Image (cartoon, rainbow, N blue to C red):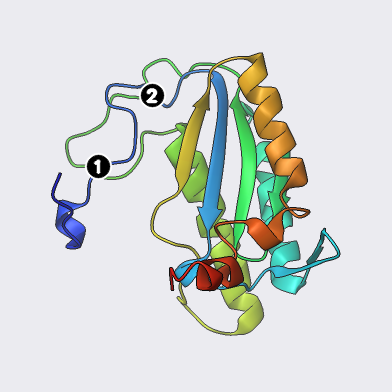
Amino acid sequence: MIHHPDKYHRQSIRLKNYDYTQAGAYFVTICTHKRECVLGDVVNGEMRLNELGQVVEMEWLKTAEIRDNVELDEFVVMPNHIHGIIVITESCVGATSRSPLRNGPAPKSIGAIVAGFKSAATKRINELCGIPRAPVWQRNYYEHVIRNEDDLNEIREYILSNPVKWELDSENPKTMQRRGLV
């Protein structure tokens, strides 16, 4: 497969023909712009959120408060990313039909939920920093459809142990430097 850096030729990382509005659990990872460590620090295996990280945590929690079809499971805000489990509790019949004029994710889909979170967190962070329209997040996000209880429990453990394993984490810039990836 040829990779085109041009934004108009990006390959989708979503499952082809999968309905991302259907009820189920989804594991998401959302990285900060340029993977900059702006949300806090890991100290002795414990994540310590700074003011920006606290904003991210508050906006993540609001995700379920403002959407009646969403529940949140385990999550962790890390220095340059957030991992979380989003549960869509009911299928949104008809939510996948889109106007041919509409771009973006289907309403009430995992993509729309993540986009809403990213938008709200960005707005609050930019207000706090006094920098209008500064990018906070990378363009996309990673998502995994959780298929069964074993998968769910494994992902929960991964999320909970993320701060303890930060020194080895592939999202940690120091780890990437040691491996010669930056």
Q: Name the residue under label 1.
A: 102
Instruction: Report x, y in % for residue 103.
Output: 26, 45
Residue at image point 71% right, 33% down: 156
Q: Which quadrant of the view contains residue 100?
A: top left
Query: Judging from the image, what secondary structure is the residue with disc 2 in?
Result: loop
Relative horizontal placement of residue 166, taking residue 93 as reference (left or right): right
Residue at image point 45% right, 32% down: 109
User: Mark 2 is on which residue type?
Assistant: Ala
Q: Name the residue under label 2.
A: 95
Q: Which residue lies furthest to the front in this view?
A: 179
Q: Residue 163: give its label.
A: none
- Looking at this view, is 63 or 7 the one in front? 7
Relative horizontal placement of residue 9, taking residue 50 as reference (left or right): left
Of pointers 1 and 2, the one earlier in the residue sequence? 2
Query: Judging from the image, what secondary structure is the residue with disc 1 in?
Result: loop
Instruction: Report x, y in % for residue 96.
Output: 33, 24
User: Mark 1 is on which residue type?
Assistant: Arg
Could you tell me if residue 11 is visible in this image? yes
